Image (cartoon, grey):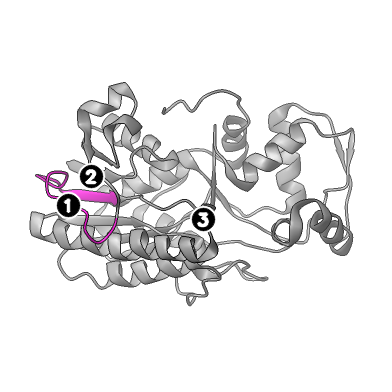
Amino acid sequence: MRVLVTGANGYVGRAARAALIDAGHDVVAAVRSLDRLSEPARAGGVAVGGIGPETDWTSALEGVDAVVHLVSPPLSHGTERQRAEEAERVIVAGTQRLMDQAIVAGVRRFIFMSSLKVLGEASGPRPFTESDPFDPQDAYAGAKARAEDAVRGCPGMETVILRPPAIYGRASGGNVRQMIELLRKAPPVLPLGYGGNRRSFVHRDNLVSAVLACVTHEAAAGRTFLVADGEAVSTGTLVRRVLRALGRRVLVIPTPRLVLAGAARLVFGAGGARRLVESYAIDDAAIRTALGWAPPLDGEAAMADAVVLGPDPYS
């Protein structure tokens, strides 16, 4: 199968490209410019310039059977208004443009990488499922939700939507990486043993495995899937998992919610405190049942990979 991967130089895109090639697919790697790809990857690369309503995907889509659309704008550049405008241009208008041209090119299946953020920033006592209503809390999540509506309403292709929670792995950025690096230098005793919340995460390799299943499995057509490593974990469980992966002997003591939230707010701000004490969990039974999918890495193996220092193996 010939598969176009957009955002092929991104954190997930690099791994998706490699996994699709290993699975025997012919991969077209779409990037803004070819100098963003490593030298070995340039042979299958296509430069499309900036992503938006004017992007010309014609050459990239030639002979393509499936599209894996991973492009997303940076979340931290510019003012709030600039980020909102960029999200609308890239995520909403850019996705619509790609779908329109993919239909003309005869593409059969379109996989769109959305985000759990379309459902909000906290799940409460019950984990999210695919049937929960949109509740985006920022411009990025709102744009992803509107793009989902466009993808879901596309009449000319089989479409699949994936909603991952926080993505982590070797050489990743983000909140899990921040926690890993803090715990790498942790003192002998840590008051981070809070067990009253549950949060879901997904390792990059597990997410890519789900992408591959969505490319080929007939039952994926027309579906929206949440995807995660497995059982959601508390902050205390996550901290202990990271410490085991690091080989650190640290005593993690139970901490009341209010104490942890107050201390975290001083160090990480309101957003960081929320992530440490609130639940953000999903139930991903749908993808497991419909596609027979299971993550290749369990939580312990995934974290053991994530703590490894060094360059991205897919770079």
Tell me if I can see residue 298 in this picture.
yes
Tell me whether the residue at label 2 lies in contact with that at label 3, contact meaning CB atoms closer than 8 angstroms.
no
Tell how many labels.
3
Tell me the quarter of the image containing the C terminus.
Answer: top left
Q: Which segment did they paint magenta?
A: 52-68
Instruction: First in sequence, mark 2 or 3: give its number.
Output: 2
Residue drawn at 20 percent across, 50 percent down: 66
Q: SS of the residue at dot 1?
A: loop
Q: Is the residue 145 above or below the residue 17 in the image?
A: below
Q: Amino acid at mark 2?
A: Val
Apparent side of residue 273 relative to residue 252 in the rendered image (left or right): left
- Disc 3 designates what residue? 78
Q: Is the residue 95 above or below the residue 40 in the image?
A: below
Observer-nearest residue: 101 or 293? 101
**How busy is the neighbourhood of tag 3: few (under 14 within 10 Å), some, or many (20 plus)?**
few
Q: Amino acid at mark 3?
A: Gly
- Disc 2 designates what residue? 48
Tell me if I can see residue 170 in this picture.
no
Give the mark toward the camera: 2 or 3.
Answer: 3
- Disc 1 designates what residue? 56
Residue drawn at 38 percent across, 65 percent down: 88
